[in-house]
Amino acid sequence: MCYLPTADLKGGWQFYLSVYNSLGTLLHPKSMSDCLSPEISSSICAHMNEDHGDAVLLYAQTFGSLTDATAAEMLSIDTEGMNLSAQVNGTALPVRIQFDRVLKDSEDAHHTLIAMVRQARSPH
């Protein structure tokens, strides 16, 4: 979840809790743009690891240049990249994959991760 400060009419601060789905996509249409907070990162990582483990492995193999990786786990994601742990010859290796640009929000992260899978799967 991402807490977003907004000024109330009396000049004080109120904090609105934006509601996100399991991918971290903003569901409340009138809220300010979301951020890739630690809570959003955890939500995205849990979803990717539970439902898209093959994609996470592709990220490590293709963008992390670990072609011998046999498994991978997404540990965190931020606006500049993602941190993975990849298994290579029985050893867990840390992998940092930088995005080609700074992401704006969790929806941008979602589209970027999909584009990266498509790129990794396309013939070179």
Image (cartoon, helix red, strand yellow):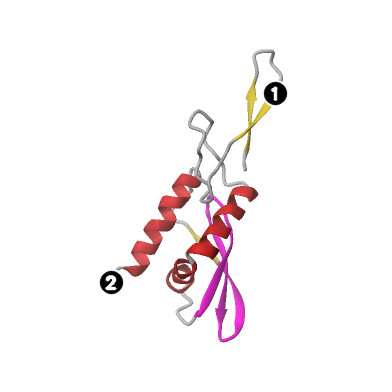
| Residue that label 2 marks | 123
Q: Amino acid at mark 2?
A: Pro
Q: Is residue 37 above or below residue 87?
A: above
Residue at x-position 51% and y-position 51%? 23
- Residue 48 is situated, as x and y percent measured from the top left of the image, at 51, 61
Q: Which mark is residue 100?
A: none
Instruction: Spot the residue most to the left.
Output: 123
**Around disc 1, counting alpha carbons within 10 Å, would you say few (fewer than 14), some (14 to 19), or many (20 or more)?**
few
Residue at image coords 62%, 40%: 2
Magenta stretch prevailing secondary structure: strand
Label 2 or label 1, whichever comes before in sequence order: 1
Q: Is residue 67 magenta?
A: no
How far apart marks 2 and 1 lie (CA) works out to 52 Å
Q: Which residue is mark 1?
A: 13
Measuring 62% from the left and 43% from the top, which residue is drawn there?
1
- Mark 1: which amino acid? Trp
Horizontal relation, residue 13 to residue 44: left or right: right
- Magenta-drawn segment: 69-95
Q: Which quadrant: the C terminus?
A: bottom left
Residue 99 on image: x %, y %: 47, 56
